[in-house]
Image (spheres, coloured by chain):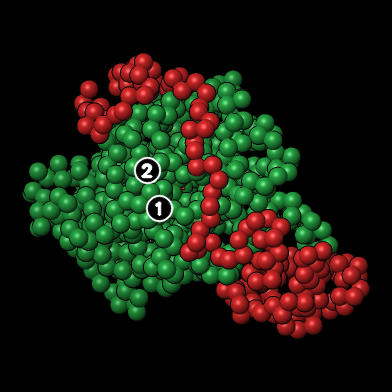
Chain colours: A red, B green
Amino acid sequence: MTPSQLCFLAGVLPGDGQWPCAADLDLDEASIGANASMLQAWERISKWALPPREKAEALAEALTTFERAHPDDFAQGLVMAYGMYYAHPNVLKVVEHRSGYAARPPQPQGHLVVSADTGEHPMTNPAEVLWRNDGTSQSEQVRMIQQTDPDRVWTIEEISTWPMS
Amino acid sequence: MTPSAKTRVVIVGAGATGAAFAWRAAAAGMDVVCLERGHWTPPASTPSARADWEVERLTSRSANPNIRKGVADYPIMDDTSVIKPAIYNGVGGSTVLWSAHAPRFRPSDFRVHSLDGVGADWPFTYWDIAPYYEMNDDIVGVSGRSGDPGNPPRTPRQTPPVPLGGAGKRVAAALNQLGWHWWPTDGQILTEPRNGRPACNGCGPCEMGCFSGARASADNTYWPLALALGAKLITGASATRISTDDQGLAKSVHWCDESGHQHETAGDYIVVACNGIGTPRLLLASANGDHSNGLANSSGQVGRNLMLHPIAGVTGIWDDRVDGWSGNDAFALLSQHFYETDPDRGFLRGYEMQLTRSQGPLLTALGGFGLDISWGASHHQRFDTVFGHSATLAVTCEDLPVDHNFISLDASITDRFGVPAARMHYQVEENAERMLDHGIAAAQKLLNQAGARETVTTRVLPGAGFHLMGTARMGTDPRSSVVDADCRSHDVPNLLIIDGSVFASAAAVNPTPTMQAIALRAADQLVGALS
Ligand SMILES: Cc1cc2nc3c(=O)[nH]c(=O)nc-3n(C[C@H](O)[C@H](O)[C@H](O)COP(=O)(O)OP(=O)(O)OC[C@H]3O[C@@H](n4cnc5c(N)ncnc54)[C@H](O)[C@@H]3O)c2cc1C
């Protein structure tokens, strides 16, 4: 990582409380599947003249200027910086601590989803048929049956006779 | 001619529709060969088990082929479109990356001209394809619950619905308070094991590919069945043109393998299933002396009438956690309260609201779904308040066919086999603009009712070019449509087009179950015609 890239990291992710500063993490470009345009932008950022991280205000100001002058490179630089940061095990531990999001990739374990029971919130007015009559005889017939018997269980055989009726 | 091992059907494209057609035609005893420019995508290659999975969602697994730049991808010029293309080229097609939200069109969607005087009617009705929706559901496996009063009845779903999740519970309660329609969404995601596929484990990012196979894609549903019935699938085969004979019939598909060697595969029937961009591209690139405007294009409608669904994203942020990163990310429930035409709203037709969940840390930090998280000193403070605290309502608006939205060829760039790039021309049309205003206001009201502290809005999600419809539309009049009700070209009788290109209207729901139902029906109609 070049000094300018480290300044970029320190400026965009300076850290806050439990959150580490990105420049302190030994981040590694090779650890993420960056594509060519991200790597080229990152290379160009390595040539930006940025104030040292100790001068936080000046660094933020310089970065704002670069963002305006080179919006595409800056945006790609952010993807590089955030990409490395939010895949880093130390950062993921902080994320887990603060949000409950497990510090691991989503697979193979997956995530537990709360509220499996959709029956808990039954639809208001389930007996009111809401789809519009399309002007066909099938529409008339099916709407009438659905209105009077909303809980009826339909079979594929019944549905297959609709085109003929 | 009766359908038999001697009737050779050559399908171009092994995606959602090509796979469904291949299975049905092979089951009827036809000799099926499918040419697919991409390859198999092994589930284990899905990045969601790797630490940098979210970066790959922006690079090698981006849904935008111009960013992904995979070996099978072809150029799509999109600077003339406010919505960018989202497709995948490989066995399974775009369903390799899809979200698997699987609602159906409603009956009125097939009769928009008769009912509302807009767009074009389909040459068949909902009732003609209802059995094919059911057939498709049985093959792919649908989670959900039957009994929705917002739609005609359907059979019991194959597995129970996906969990509502933290935000879903709140939004469902708010919908009840407002008296607005909602229903658990039909999805092609298993919530219980079925036919050798496991139940979804709620990992989140379906749109990178499904690591476990719980989410249906054409490569894990139709293709194994079609191959077992003897269908042949040639991968790495990029069709460059379709040739015709002196009687005006389609003769063969010319294609290149990956080393650039040229091949020609002849068929009794040629079936095009390259999606709403790839299909017009191939037909236009197949222009010849007898078809100077492009194949099957005497109407001039090939490539025209592009419909995409402009989608607004309205994100709610709650004070407490809703754990939006858990569960399949793209749907939990839907509301079709504003689906049918009500002239008092100031627009015709309507929209659907689909509750999606949220994203992982990286995409949240980058401001996905309109979240405004700046870099610098305030970054983490804002991140803490939004990550795991948000969910998004996608407002999916019906698109109407208009002159300024179409696909053309752009010969300034070609793929590596010399076929011109596709160019997408798309601006949101006027009726949909009014619908967006209404839908965004409704979504904000709903999220506020659900207790969201804050809402942020993206008026049109720029990356949402995944519902590709209308570019070779069906109809009864050969002067204004490309194919008939059976998906057969008016001009070239042994040429079929079976993907979303044939849609006469767009409805306001995700289109893939309708595409697959149409492909199955087209196969049956062909078999029926030959018997
Ligand atoms: C990120 C994402 C999310 C989505 N979510 C949903 C959803 O929730 N619900 C929904 O209904 N839909 C969704 N979709 C859309 C859905 O995937 C498509 O509607 C569906 O796959 C279209 O099927 P198809 O057969 O027409 O085309 P595709 O599935 O795109 O398949 C076309 C195939 O043709 C091949 N091909 C193209 N040109 C050639 C050629 N010249 N020679 C040989 N082969 C060729 C391609 O490689 C491709 O494999 C989503 C799509 C994406 C990308």
Please state the quadrant of the image where ligand 1 appears: bottom left
Quadrant of res B120: top left
B337 vs B497: above or below: above
| Tag 1: amino acid | Ala
Q: Is residue B28 left or right of residue B348?
A: left
Density class for disc 2 (Cα within 10 Å; few <14, some 14-19, many ≥20) is many
Chain letter behind tag 1: B
Which residue is nearer to you in this view: B51 or B407? B51
Amino acid at pointer 2 = Thr
Task: Give the residue at the far left of this rendering.
Answer: B1
Per the image, the residue denoted by label 2 is: B159
Query: Which label number is shown at residue B296?
Result: none
Residue in the picture at 66% in, 72% down: A88
Viewer-proximal residue among B522 and B20 = B20
Q: Residue at x 64, y 42 (%)?
A: B314
Image quadrant for the C terminus of chain B? top left
User: In the drawing, does residue B518 fall left or right of residue B364?
Assistant: left
Q: Quadrant of residue B242?
A: bottom left
| Residue furthest bottom as drawn | A2
Chain name for mark 2: B
Q: Is residue B159 above or below residue B147?
A: below
- Quick check: A89 above or below A117? below
Residue closer to the observer: B294 or A68: A68
Q: Are marks 2 and 1 in contact (CB under 8 Å)?
A: yes
Horizontal and vertical percent position of residue B142: 37, 44
User: Which callout, 2 or 1, points at the residue further toward the start of the chain?
Assistant: 2
